[in-house]
DNA sequence: GCATTACCCTGAAAGC
DNA sequence: TGCTTTCAGGGTAATG
């Protein structure tokens, strides 16, 4: 389940494989990803050289010298790799882009919650980016202020508000549980009922856990692999996520799990208030 | 306008 | 053993 740190790890591993390569052909499976695309939509990319692989939040994209490119959302199970064409095609391969160096970029996604969206110019990319809040991995002091203030204006649960990509981009279920644990904030609390100093502490904790996630190459619970096919290690550093019933690393109490909106929330009732 | 819920999807795991 | 049901959740559309 890729969140900011996983997508950043994919970006770092993908960039050296893709930058400088010219896209020579495109193939799209007959199954639709979240958004239906076609081989024809990749036409503005053909013959173009990739100049950058970039990311904001969970949104990953590459740009060509002609400012065309493609946005990639990994969804739950999306995987990107660059391999030799003779490598057997994995089940659920949905997009292949041939590269002039002889290899091909592949997008595999069993659950098809993700997307590969070609764009002919930067307008579509800009529109997507403008929907996203600041990215914790590149927070400025102003960003921290902004998110802290935004949280103070909503009566949603603080966990739900932090998961809103328009509020802050790149946070998913794993890292939000971890961040609220380190900030000592109860995830069930209404965001506007949390004091400003504690909201700020939560926002800064989000940044810290995401940076930690990147340092550990991301969190692999089941499917996540970087563009080199490597698993992450951050799952071995989680304090509360998927640790229901285990001892809280701070107080020794039992880690609780609650489900709302179909998502599990892990927290310590004693340390998080 | 804001908050909440439903839905998409596959495969692993649990239940029977 | 083998079939059926449940669960996981990112992001968006639909609903309240």
Image (spheres, coloured by chain):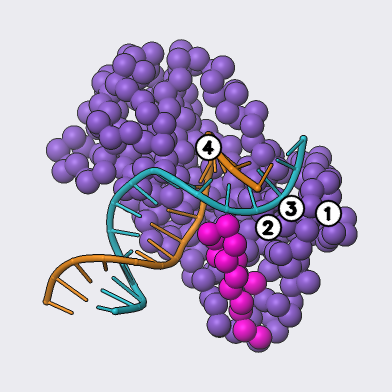
Chain colours: A purple, B cyan, C orange
What is the quadrant of residue C14 in the picture?
A: top right
Protein chain holding label 1: A
Q: Choose between A186 and A17: the one closer to the eye.
A: A186
- Label 1 and label 3: CA atoms lie apart by 8 Å
Range of residues picked out in magenta: A253-267
Q: Nearer the viewer, mark 3 or mark 2?
A: 3
Residue pointed to by mark 1:
A192
Mark 4 vs mark 1: tell me if same chain: yes
**Is the stretch drawn in magenta largely helix, strand or loop?**
strand
- Could you tell me if the residues under marks 3 and 4 are in contact, i.e. CB atoms within 8 Å? no
Left or right: A228, with A178 as reference point? left
Q: CA distance from mark 2 to mark 1?
A: 12 Å
> Pointer 4 indicates a residue of which chain?
A
Q: Nearer the viewer, residue A270 or A207?
A: A270
Task: Judge the density around disc 1: few (<14), some (14-19), many (≥20) Cα neighbours within 10 Å.
Answer: some
Q: Nearer the viewer, residue A60 or A199?
A: A199
* x 26%, y 21%: residue: A25
Mark 2 neighbour class, 10 Å CA radius: few under 14, some 14 to 19, many 20 or more = many
Q: Which residue is mark 4?
A: A59
Q: Which mark is residue A159?
A: 2
Mark 2 or mark 1, earlier in chain: 2
Q: Nearer the viewer, mark 4 or mark 1?
A: 1
Mark 2 and mark 1 residues within 8 Å of each other at the beta carbon: no
Q: Is residue A236 above or below residue A213?
A: below
Q: Which residue is mark 3?
A: A156
Tell me the crowding category of disc 4: few under 14, some 14 to 19, or many 20 or more residues within 10 angstroms, Cα based: many
Queried whether the magenta region covers residue A256, the answer comes back as yes
Q: Is residue A68 visible?
A: yes
- State if disc 2 and disc 3 touch (CB < 8 Å): no
């Amino acid at each position: 389940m890729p969140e900011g740190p996983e997508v950043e790890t994919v970006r770092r591993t993908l960039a050296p494989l893709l930058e400088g390569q010219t896209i020579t052909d495109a193939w799209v499976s007959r199954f639709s990803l979240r958004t239906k695309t076609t081989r024809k939509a990749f036409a503005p990319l053909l013959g173009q050289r990739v100049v950058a692989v970039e990311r904001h939040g969970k949104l990953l994209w590459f740009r060509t010298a002609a400012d065309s490119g493609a946005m990639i959302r990994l969804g739950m199970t999306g995987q990107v790799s660059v391999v030799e064409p003779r490598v057997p095609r994995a089940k659920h391969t949905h997009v292949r882009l041939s590269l002039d160096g002889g290899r091909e970029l592949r997008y595999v996604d069993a659950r098809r919650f993700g997307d590969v969206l070609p764009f002919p110019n930067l307008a579509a990319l800009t529109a997507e980016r403008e929907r996203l809040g600041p990215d914790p991995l590149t927070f400025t002091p102003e960003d921290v202020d902004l998110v802290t203030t935004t949280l103070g204006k909503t009566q949603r649960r603080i966990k739900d508000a932090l998961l809103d990509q328009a509020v802050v981009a790149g946070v998913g279920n794993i890292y939000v549980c971890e961040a609220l644990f380190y900030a000592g904030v109860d995830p069930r609390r209404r965001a506007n009922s949390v004091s400003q100093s504690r909201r700020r502490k939560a926002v800064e904790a989000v940044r810290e856990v995401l940076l930690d996630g990147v340092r550990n190459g991301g969190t692999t619970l089941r499917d996540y692999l970087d563009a080199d096919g490597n698993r992450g290690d951050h799952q071995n550093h989680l304090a509360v996520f998927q640790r229901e019933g285990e001892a809280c690393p701070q107080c020794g109490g039992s880690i609780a799990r609650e489900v709302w909106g179909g998502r599990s929330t892990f927290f310590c009732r004693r340390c998080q208030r």
